[in-house]
Image: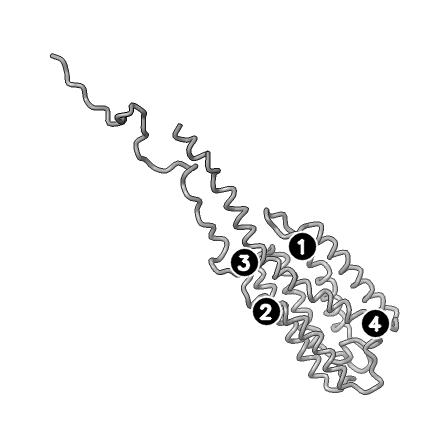
């Protein structure tokens, strides 16, 4: 007896094969959500970290201007350092001391908030903030800086100069400001400024105050530049990550052919 032919459910009336529904392949599965980036627009750098990065140089410059205005006419900002303003020989030393405390705290907070850079760079920026707090906690006597004060001052200068070298990265879509070449250039510039400052302090040059103020102001702005570059870099990083996870338009159709 002839057996009845069982209908082929895998074929349609047109005779062309259609695949049975099944689990989505890797080519058509939607890309997973990248949990490394927060959902908010701030990305890996929170807004408060940008605020502390901005506040540090503003308070530093404002502190030495306000404290310098309270000094007698014999004080020269070109020759004398900010340590003199916060030391025992300065008039109203609490003004510069308070400014240094705020600057050091902002540096520590900024280092803790820069989640977009490597951990060694964040630790080094935190050490810079601790050195700044150490400078404020060891005021310079009228006879001159103490060894403890000099240790904190040199540590602050060295860590600030080396810090940009640890910020460099090669992630796809990373800003050119944070590239290895740019950070190496900034490191060399900071090293030159720090050497100028150390030489002026060692040999008693008449422009020691100018060297200290210019070096600290320029170096103090770079954490703000890094924070802003990281926040603006988040859309490019997401786009670069999505381009590797989402297939081209024609690849999904080719799977079914």
Which residue carries the number 2 mark?
51
How far is disc 2 from disc 4 in space, using C-alphas? 30 Å
Q: Residue furthest top?
A: 1
How far is disc 3 from disc 4 in space, using C-alphas? 38 Å
Q: Residue furthest front?
A: 14
Query: At which x and y percent is residue 163?
Result: 69, 59
Query: At which x and y percent is residue 79?
Result: 84, 76
Between marks 4 and 1 in the image, the one whose residue lies nearer the viewer: 1
Between marks 3 and 4 in the image, the one whose residue lies nearer the viewer: 3
Which residue carries the number 1 mark?
177
Mark 1: secondary structure = helix
Which residue carries the number 3 mark?
44
Between marks 1 and 3 in the image, the one whose residue lies nearer the viewer: 1
Q: Relative to residue 216, is residue 202 drawn left or right? A: right
Residue at screen point 65% across, 69% down: 130
| Labels 2 and 4: the sequence-earlier one | 2
| Labels 4 and 1: the sequence-earlier one | 1
Query: At which x and y percent is residue 197?
Result: 81, 67
Residue at screen point 79% across, 75% down: 81
Q: Relative to residue 38, is residue 72 drawn left or right? A: right
Which residue carries the number 4 mark?
208
């Amino acid at each position: 007896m002839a057996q009845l032919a069982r209908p082929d459910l895998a074929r349609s009336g047109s005779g062309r094969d259609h695949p049975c529904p099944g689990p989505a392949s890797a080519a058509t599965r939607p890309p997973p959500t990248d949990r490394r980036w927060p959902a908010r627009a701030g990305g890996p750098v929170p807004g408060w970290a940008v605020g502390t990065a901005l506040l540090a140089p503003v308070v530093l410059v404002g502190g030495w201007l306000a404290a310098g205005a309270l000094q007698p006419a014999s004080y020269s900002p070109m020759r004398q350092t900010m340590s003199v303003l916060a030391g025992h020989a300065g008039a109203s030393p609490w003004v510069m001391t308070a400014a240094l405390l705020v600057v050091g705290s902002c540096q520590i907070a900024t280092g803790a908030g820069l989640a977009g850079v490597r951990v060694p760079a964040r630790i080094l920026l935190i050490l810079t903030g601790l050195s700044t707090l150490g400078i404020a906690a060891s005021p310079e006597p009228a006879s001159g800086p103490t060894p403890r004060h000099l240790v904190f001052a040199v540590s602050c200068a060295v860590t600030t100069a080396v810090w940009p070298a640890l910020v460099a990265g090669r992630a796809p879509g990373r800003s050119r400001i944070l590239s290895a070449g740019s950070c190496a250039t900034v490191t060399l510039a900071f090293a030159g400024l720090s050497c100028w400052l150390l030489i002026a302090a060692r040999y008693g040059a008449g422009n020691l105050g100018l060297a200290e103020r210019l070096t600290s102001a320029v170096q103090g702005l770079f954490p703000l530049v890094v924070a802003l570059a990281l926040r603006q870099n988040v859309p490019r990083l997401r786009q670069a990550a999505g381009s590797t996870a989402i297939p081209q338009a024609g690849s999904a159709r080719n799977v079914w052919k």
